Image (cartoon, rainbow, N blue to C red):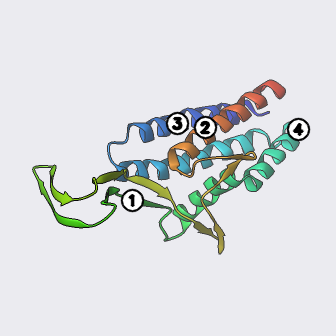
C-alpha cells in the first residue's frame, strides 16, 4: 500500500472528524445543515485517498470490495450520492424543519387565547378537558437526492442494521466505518 497516499487518507479522516465535531457544536439548524455539506465533501476525499493508496498490489482487491460496499450499502451509498447531488446538482440535500408547538384540547373549548410576549407563551384557556402541549423540536432532515437521474432516499439501513435518518447519526456511523477500514488496511497492508 502506498504510504504517502495512505497518510493522506489518515489526514483526511482527521479533517472528517473535525467536520463531525463542527456538526456537534452547531448553534443553529442552518449551521448544522452547512456543516453536513462540508462533511459530505470531506468523506469523498477520504475515499479518494484510500483508493489511491490501494491501487496496486493485494490491497487493490481489498479496496474493490470496500468500493462495492460503498455503492451497495444504503447509508454509504446515500452519503456518496448526496455529496454528488450537492456538488453537481441544483437541488437541496437537506430541509430545515423549525419545529413548533402542538396543542391538544381533547374536546370542547369555551375560550382559548394564546399570546407570545418577550419569548414567552401566555395561554388563557377555559374548557372541560386539560390542555396537552406537544413540543416539536426543530431538525435537519435528509432529503431524497438525485445523482445522474437516479433517486436515492435517505438511508434506513447501514450494514444491515436500522439507523435513524438524520445527519448526526449518518455522520457518526460514517466516521466509525472509515476508522474501521483505515485500521483494517493498516493491519493487512502495512504502508511502505
Side of 173 relative to 31 (left or right): right
Q: CA distance from mark 2 to mark 1?
A: 25 Å
| Of marks 3 and 2, the one in the foreground | 2
The residue pinned by badge 2 equals 175
Relative image position of residue 103 (x, y in whole percent)? 30, 58
Q: Residue at x 67, y 37 (%)?
A: 178
Q: Earlier in the sequence, mark 4 or mark 2?
A: 4
Relative image position of residue 112 (x, y in whole percent)? 17, 63
The residue pinned by badge 4 equals 57
Q: Earlier in the sequence, mark 3 or mark 1?
A: 3
Q: Where the N terminus falls, by quadrant?
A: top right
| Of marks 3 and 1, the one in the foreground | 1
Check contact, mark 3 vs mark 2: CB within 8 A. no
| Of marks 4 and 2, the one in the foreground | 2
The residue pinned by badge 3 equals 15
Side of 66 relative to 155 (left or right): right
The residue pinned by badge 1 equals 97
| Of marks 1 and 4, the one in the foreground | 1
Q: Is residue 148 visible?
A: no
In the displayed image of the protein, which residue is found farthest to the front?
128
Amino acid at each position: 500500500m502506498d504510504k504517502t497516499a495512505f497518510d493522506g487518507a489518515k489526514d483526511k479522516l482527521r479533517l472528517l472528524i473535525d467536520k463531525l465535531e463542527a456538526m456537534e457544536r452547531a448553534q443553529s439548524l442552518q449551521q448544522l445543515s452547512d456543516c453536513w455539506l462540508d462533511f459530505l465533501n470531506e468523506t469523498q476525499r477520504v475515499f479518494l485517498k484510500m483508493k489511491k493508496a490501494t491501487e496496486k498490489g493485494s490491497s487493490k482487491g481489498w479496496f474493490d470490495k470496500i468500493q462495492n460496499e460503498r455503492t451497495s450499502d444504503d447509508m454509504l451509498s446515500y452519503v456518496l450520492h448526496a455529496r454528488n447531488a450537492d456538488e453537481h446538482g441544483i437541488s437541496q440535500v437537506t430541509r430545515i424543519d423549525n419545529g413548533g408547538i402542538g396543542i391538544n384540547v381533547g374536546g370542547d373549548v369555551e375560550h382559548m387565547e394564546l399570546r407570545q410576549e418577550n419569548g414567552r407563551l401566555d395561554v388563557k384557556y377555559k374548557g372541560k378537558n386539560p390542555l396537552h402541549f406537544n413540543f416539536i423540536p426543530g431538525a435537519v432532515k435528509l432529503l431524497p437526492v438525485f445523482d445522474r437521474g437516479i433517486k436515492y432516499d435517505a438511508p434506513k439501513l447501514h450494514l444491515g442494521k436500522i439507523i435513524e435518518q438524520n445527519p448526526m447519526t449518518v455522520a457518526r456511523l460514517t466516521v466509525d466505518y472509515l476508522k474501521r477500514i483505515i485500521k483494517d488496511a493498516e493491519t493487512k497492508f502495512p504502508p511502505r
